[in-house]
Image (cartoon, rainbow, N blue to C red):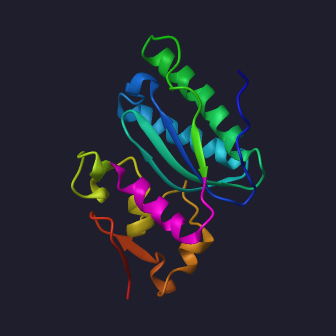
Amino acid sequence: MTRLPRIALPSIPQHVIQRGNNRQPCFYADDDYHFYLECLGEAARKYHVSIHAYVLMTNHVHLLLTPAAMTGVSQVMQTLGRRYVRYINHTYRRSGTLWEGRYHASLVQADYYLLTCYRYIELNPVRAGMTDDPAGYRWSSYRCNALGQPDKLIEPHEYYLGWAPNQASGRPFTVNCFGRISTRS
């Protein structure tokens, strides 16, 4: 059976999820997380895809991406998959697939849903019981988006920035560990 084509539109954000095969780990050591983020950044720059939020869990990833071209996200994921799987297989002397089939992607068309996706992605480690405070999880964009710490991968979405009642703070809102959005005053 042939694969159905993905729906992708330029300038429309996508929530991308990719899971480890059989829910097995995709990241084994800090170097793995670093290499994945490096590959993600390079591919995003090459294919003109903005990264708004991310979280790397031990057995899956969530990304919030906006492509400039229709094929941007698929090109990023294909490039990322090839490099990262080759790295993992070589580093850990394994073979075969790392990911469980194709990545899943959903268009994020409504502005309010965009904020919900930011929150969902960045609070994933809290929901998984890995931390009580999302700022304590190293492999997430939370500290950049909620606390204003620099992250060279992150390019805030225009709606996210436009939501700010206080533009001088650099970040429009914070998300506490219960997922509640609060504006900065």
Q: Quadrant of the N terminus?
A: top right
| Closer to us: 46 or 157 | 157
| Closer to us: 111 or 172 | 111
| Count of numbered badges drawn on the protein | 0
The correct choice, above or below, for 157 with respect to 183 in the image is above
- Residue at 78% in and 52% down: 69
Q: Is residue 170 magenta?
A: no
| Closer to us: 150 or 128 | 128
Q: Which picture quadrant has residue 30?
A: top left
Q: Specify whether 173 is left or right of 4.
A: left
Can residue 56 be seen here? yes
- Residue at 28% in and 45% down: 128
- Residue at 59% in and 50% down: 106
Q: Which picture quadrant has residue 135?
A: bottom left
User: x and y percent of residue 73 in the render?
Assistant: 67, 45
Q: Specify whether 132 is left or right of 110.
A: left
- Residue at 50% in and 11% down: 95
Q: Main secondary structure of the magenta part?
A: helix
User: x and y percent of residue 67 in the render?
Assistant: 70, 53
Q: Quadrant of the C terminus?
A: bottom left
Q: Specify whether 37 is left or right of 4.
A: left
The correct choice, above or below, for 165 with respect to 68 in the image is below
The correct choice, above or below, for 177 with respect to 33 in the image is below
Q: Is residue 110 magenta?
A: yes
User: x and y percent of residue 37 in the render?
Assistant: 51, 42
Can residue 150 be seen here? no
In the image, which residues are magenta? 107-124
User: x and y percent of residue 85 in the render?
Assistant: 54, 23
